[in-house]
Amino acid sequence: MHQLKDIQGSGQILQLLKHLRVQSPFEKMWLITLHWAQLQSGFHVPLLQDPTVPAPHLERLYISSLREFLASINSSIITEHPYTIRFTIEP
Amino acid sequence: MDVVITSNLFTPAEYKTINYCRMFLQVYSIADLTLAGGKHIDSSFLALDPSLLSSTSALVEPLQDQPQTASTLRIRQWANRLWCNTVTGGLHQPLGKWLVPGPQLRQSWPFYFNPDTNTLWSRTGEGFRVHSGIQIGSNLRNMQFHLQTNRQSTILSSNSFETTTRFIITSQSSVLTIIPPPTPNTPTFLANLSSWQQSLLNQMTMEHSHQEIVSTKPPILIAINNKKSILRLYPTRP
């Protein structure tokens, strides 16, 4: 029996990949959404590339649930030009 | 935020409040909160009230309202636990060297120092004013510069590095005006976007051009209550 959580998660991944691989306005809207989510999260690593770091402060629930599902199946999504905050000083 | 989250010192509600404070200050790392020396936190950031001498973000940022006063007290407690002594402002562990030159930093500073020419560069609305030195010695904390200058530049020299208010500008006849960098909704702001932001902006299809939206519309009064007026900028067809 399929779990609804798995169906939702796999559907979210398919939808995201479908739009990111097609040159369309939806791709741009997705990239804008991901960039703004990255800015809002304040994380240095791309949100979908390392979903294991919890983000309780993230306000975009769709991306939050997508990250939770990716973390549960030990997966990540690597986009071509992820927007990240680079380090500017030696730690 | 990575460090804050992985510290496991806070509740989910506190994580959200910390992130609100971070977004209001428009910072991403400790390096953005410290003075140029990397040893002390800018005290005005801890008070959630950045001064004109504080660094400001050069990125396109989400705009977050100032958190409530209670957050000001709590952010000091959190900062004390994580990074610094909030009385002296000293970091528990001083930061290392900058990895990129001053002009390429994420933060924009009101003053830069060029060690090759011993000049101080102060930000203006159009670029930078270049102040020559009066007393240049080995002690960087006691350098003095002429306030009045005719030299201006629109581009910051690549080898300049950011400075704090320890550099003193002396004058008896005029007052130095510090102009913050351009803010959103101004044409200058759009002109100073980084390459990837320009690229993304140019790909967007909009009914009105971005320049048209930010340059021609006056503020429109949309709501009034008994205590204060609320002004919002809404684009309309000219």
Image (spheres, rainbow, N blue to C red):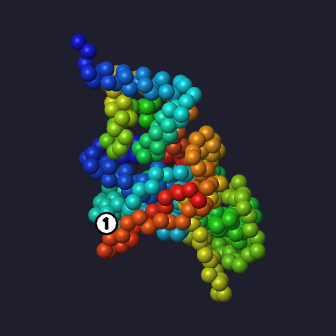
- Identify which residue, B60 or B237, lies in the foreground: B237
Q: Percent position (x, y) of residue A26?
A: 50, 32
Number of numbered discs present? 1
- Of the 4 image quadrants, the one containing the C terminus of chain B is bottom right
Q: Percent position (x, y) of residue B217?
A: 56, 62
Q: Is residue B62 left or right of residue B120?
A: left
| Residue located at (39% from left, 60% from top) | B65
Q: Residues within 10 Å of mark 1 (few under 14, many from 20)?
A: few
| Residue located at (48% from left, 35% from top) | A30
Residue B172 appears in which quarter of the rendering? Answer: bottom right
Q: Farthest residue to the top: give it.
A: A1
What SS does tag 1 mark?
Answer: helix
- Identify which residue, B204 or B30, lies in the foreground: B204
Amino acid carrying mark 1 in the image? Thr
| Residue located at (38% from left, 66% from top) | B223
Q: Farthest residue to the front: give it.
A: B238
Q: Percent position (x, y) of residue B45?
A: 43, 63
User: Relative to B50, does residue B192 appear above or below in the rendering?
Assistant: above
- Identify which residue, A4 or B34, lies in the foreground: A4
Residue B151 appears in which quarter of the rendering? Answer: bottom right
| Residue located at (72% from left, 69% from top) | B130
The chain to which mark 1 is attached is: B
User: Relative to B153, does residue B7 appear above or below in the rendering?
Assistant: above
In the rendered image, is residue B80 in sight? no
Q: Is residue B211 left or right of residue B55?
A: right
- Identify which residue, B9 or B94, lies in the foreground: B9
> Mark 1 — residue?
B69
Q: Farthest residue to the bottom: give it.
A: B173
In the rendered image, is residue B51 in sight? yes
Q: Percent position (x, y) of residue B89?
A: 42, 63
User: Relative to B145, does residue B69 appear above or below in the rendering?
Assistant: above
